[in-house]
Image (tube, rainbow, N blue to C red):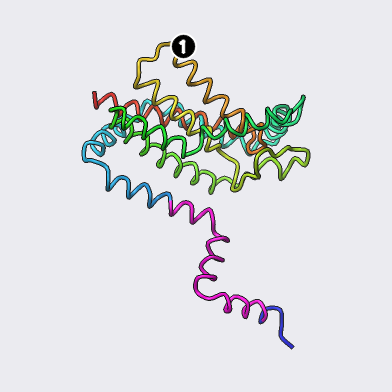
Amino acid sequence: MQQPNDVHLSEVQNLGVWGRLTRRVSRNRPLVWLVGLALSLVLFLVWAPPFVWLFFWIGLQANALLVGMILGFGLLALSLLWSAGQQLDSWAFLFFNVRGRRPRWLDWLMTGFTQIGHGIAAVVLALILFFAGYGLLAYVLILGVLALWLIVELVKALTPRRRPFFRLTQARIVGGRAGGRSFPSGHTSQAFFMATLLVGYFDLGVWGAVLLYAIALLVGITRIYVGAHYPRDVLAGAILGSAWGLLGGIIFGYAL
């Protein structure tokens, strides 16, 4: 009679090379994402023109301006160890996620609006900027999105914070069950990165800046509404994305 371990070993052997590789990838999905993002960033840097390298290096040398935001992000990450903070997080999450009427049209609207923080939206915006004659801005946008995505995934890998619906059984999931870990919000960070970068480059005036940041803030709210993130995840994403956008602004400061 075969032992359970023998049966399990036999099943793994019958999968074949591709089957075993797929099995390992599914079990180590966060690590695979990190490797894939890192390779994408390296390939983009290799492909990018030399002047992009130069502007990016000069910008890194001026990162003292970002110390305050980085410190704030670190303190927010440490606050995850505070149990009272988790209670406040849960209360605020449920306020945006379940309280009040939730008509179907609002669910559809919020599900659509949250996609502004998706990487595909950034790629579309970069293409528009590139063909509109803002090639350097398009390069910095794509480079910033890839690097920021990598940073977000690294922080998530180091922060064992599960999605709200694992802890709060009454949480609503709208549009689809988000995978991975919760801290920080990647969609929010990308939205604030794009808003900060565009505000720093274009002379939009006060109302233009207010509009872009309002859109980024609404993206953050949608992440709570659809049940994907706690408020502190969103706040951390806003700080991280804004800091990364300021770095892009420093690059443009030397480029102009």
Q: Nearer the viewer, residue 236 or 53?
A: 53
Determine if the magenta segment contains residue 17: yes
Q: Nearer the viewer, residue 172 or 71?
A: 172
Residue 194 point in image, percent of width and height: 43, 29
Q: Residue furthest top?
A: 206
Determine if the magenta segment contains residue 216: no
Residue 54 point in image, percent of width and height: 23, 36
The residue shown at (43%, 35%) is 122
Q: Residue furthest left?
A: 50
Q: Amino acid at mark 1?
A: Trp
Residue 185 point in image, percent of width and height: 56, 36
Q: Residues within 10 Å of mark 1 (few under 14, many from 20)?
A: few
**On the rendered structure, is 203 left or right of 71?**
left
The residue shown at (42%, 35%) is 124
Q: Main secondary structure of the magenta part?
A: helix
**On the rendered structure, is 40 left or right of 133?**
right
Q: Quadrant of residue 12?
A: bottom right
Residue 164 point in image, percent of width and height: 68, 40
Q: Which residues are magenta?
A: 7-36
User: Where does label 1 land, which residue?
Assistant: 207
- The image quadrant where one finds the N terminus is bottom right
The residue shown at (41%, 32%) is 125
